[in-house]
Image (tube, rainbow, N blue to C red):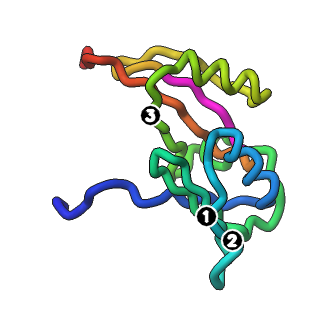
Amino acid sequence: MKEITRVNHIGLRVFDLATTREFYEKLGFKFIVGPVGPEPIAVMEHPSGVNLNLILNAKEKTDINQLMDVPTKYAGYTHVALEVTDIHSVKSQLDEQAIVITEGPVEFPSGFSLFIRDPDKNVVEFHQPKKEHSW
């Protein structure tokens, strides 16, 4: 569809708003509003325009991500990739914030990535594209 212009927001089901808010604020997101709505959400936005809808109805805290951490691979969104200009700077900032890097930096044909998990085990990738792709 030619009418699609960009991703509007990313919806994340979360257990605890305060914990999740604190985590994403470390990544530069600003709290906008919440909880609001019948299925309560909170909204956070990064200065780059990336918008998060935190869906506040997870029944319990979990130590696993059902799409990533179990042997059976279910269909669904597995992660969000945030494009960055300097993967090494991102790594340094994550280290300073004591945010655990679960993988990387690793090199892919398209660029360099590293991965973290938020408090609800959602995977966040930071990706620095190569100037020219080799694929």
Where disc 3 sits, the SS reads strand
Q: Does residue 31 appear to the left or right of 22 in the view shown?
A: left
Going from the N terminus, do you reach mark 3 or mark 2 first?
A: 2
Left or right of residue 86: residue 27: right
The answer to whether 56 is drawn above or below residue 115 in the figure is: below
> From what the image shows, is residue 57 above or below residue 44?
below
Residue 27 image-quadrant placement: top right
Residue 31, how many percent across, how many down? 66, 58
Amino acid carrying label 1: it is: Val
Left/right placement of residue 13 relative to residue 88 reads right
Residue hosting label 1: 43
Q: Callout 1: helix, strand or loop?
A: strand
Instruction: Determine crowd level at label 3: few under 14, some 14-19, many 20+ residues with C-alpha closer than 10 A.
Output: few
Tell me the distance, in whole angstroms, between the alpha carbons under discs 1 and 2.
6 Å
The residue that appears at 26% across and 19% down in the rendered structure is 133
Magenta region: which residues?
113-118
In which quadrant is the C terminus drawn?
top left
Nearest to the observer: residue 112 or residue 33? 33
Kind of residue indicated by mark 3: Glu
